Amino acid sequence: MLYNNYKMATLTAIRQYTLSDFKNKEDSGNIPELENLVIEKINKLASRVGAPTYQKTPVFKRYNYNKKKKVNENITSDDWETIRNFKTTTLDKNMEGLEAQMDQIRSYLNKLTNENYKEISNEIKMVIKDIVDQNEEQYLSKIGVSIFEIGSANRFLSKVYVKLYKELIDTYPIMKNVCTSNFNSFQLLFETFDYCDANENYDKFCDITKQNEKRKALSKFLMICVEYNIIELESMEKIILDFLNKINEYIECKEKENAVDEIVANLAIMILSSVTVFKKMNSHNKIFKDIEILSGLNVKKYPGLSNKTLFKFLDIVEELEDENSSSDDE
């Protein structure tokens, strides 16, 4: 009884936080930075979980140790000859060295932060230079893929990875092909949207959530690529205008509600991740007006428009108006 009372008192004493607490903390501007060690661990986890070969559930093989092995007594003389002449497979030392260097680059990429950027980026560049000096320039595309995959999966450090990517492209232009290829297929990610109730199929719900997060991270990464002149401004502007056309079409259909939610979430990320870039677009005033109109719609009249999306439109309008006010004050 005494133990139970102590347990209840301990649970009661645990501090609980609401969304308002986090919002107040954000508004205060007094947010301590994470330690480098913590950021490094988060990056490693994000890289592993985001990898296409990642398995959520480990697969264990079951062995029957009580079962005796059967020996095939009918081994021919040819079989014995093969066994005697068996040679272990030897790896090409040069290839083995290159793969080790690739692993080293991936390791450095997972450690990259704002604080250690100069040190880690120099280490990466030295390894790449060593690979090129070995006349293995075909590996540059592979390196570009690694940077793109890791960088575009990390929304919090997108700018750091794009900065490195830009510096490498300036030295090795072939790396830009990876970004161009991914950008060209970017819009295809918004053609189909899956939805699943977590109560009906939790595993599928988690898979869909993971895909949605990857899409958002990629949106931010590509917008910052525009900021660093890796991707043309007009190309991203066209995508944003296409998104708005899709939204205006989809809000008329109830079955498109989830698609609208995702498109608007990515639209907000693209615009707000680099307002400076957005303002350079020729049609930025038109885009702002369209979003302003959408933010004032009645959800009851548009079956494909949710309150969640409506508030996201209002967030975009508010952020852009605040940005304009700040610019006017200066």
Image (spheres, helix red, strand yellow):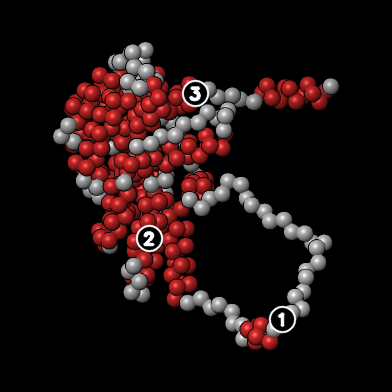
Amino acid under disc 3: Leu
Of the residues under marks 3 and 2, which one precedes in the sequence? 3
Residue at the image point whose x is 72% and y is 22% from the top: 9
Structural crowding at the residue carrying mark 1, measured as other residues with C-alpha within 10 Å and reported as few (<14), some (14–19) or many (≥20):
few
Would you call the spot at circle 2 few (<14 residues within 10 Å), some (14-19), or many (20 or more)?
some
Depth check: 327 or 272 in front?
A: 272
Q: Is residue 323 visible?
A: no
C-alpha span from label 3 to label 1: 72 Å
Disc 1, SS: loop
Spatial separation of the CA atoms under disc 3 and disc 2: 40 Å
Picture residue at 69% right of the left edge, 83% below the top = 76
Q: Which residue is mark 2?
A: 143
Q: Which residue is mark 1?
A: 75
Where in the figure is residue 144, as x and y percent of width and height? 35, 58
Identified by mark 1, the residue type is: Ile
What residue appears at the point 26 percent right and 20 percent down from the top-left corner? 292
Provide residue 178's location: percent of width, then percent of height: 32, 55
Q: Position of residue 235 (x, y in %)?
A: 22, 42
Could you tell me how far apart the alpha carbons at marks 2 and 1 are, in whole angstroms? 49 Å
- Going by the numbered disc 2, the residue's amino acid type is Ile
Percent of width and height locating residue 128 = 36, 65
Disc number placed over residue 19 in the picture, else none: 3
- The numbered mark, 2 or 1, whose residue comes first in the sequence reads 1
Q: Residue at x 31, y 41 (%)?
A: 187
Instruction: Check the image and report above or below for 215 versus 259.
Output: below
Q: Along the horizontal axis of the image, is 66 left or right of 163? A: right
> Disc 3 on helix, strand or loop?
helix
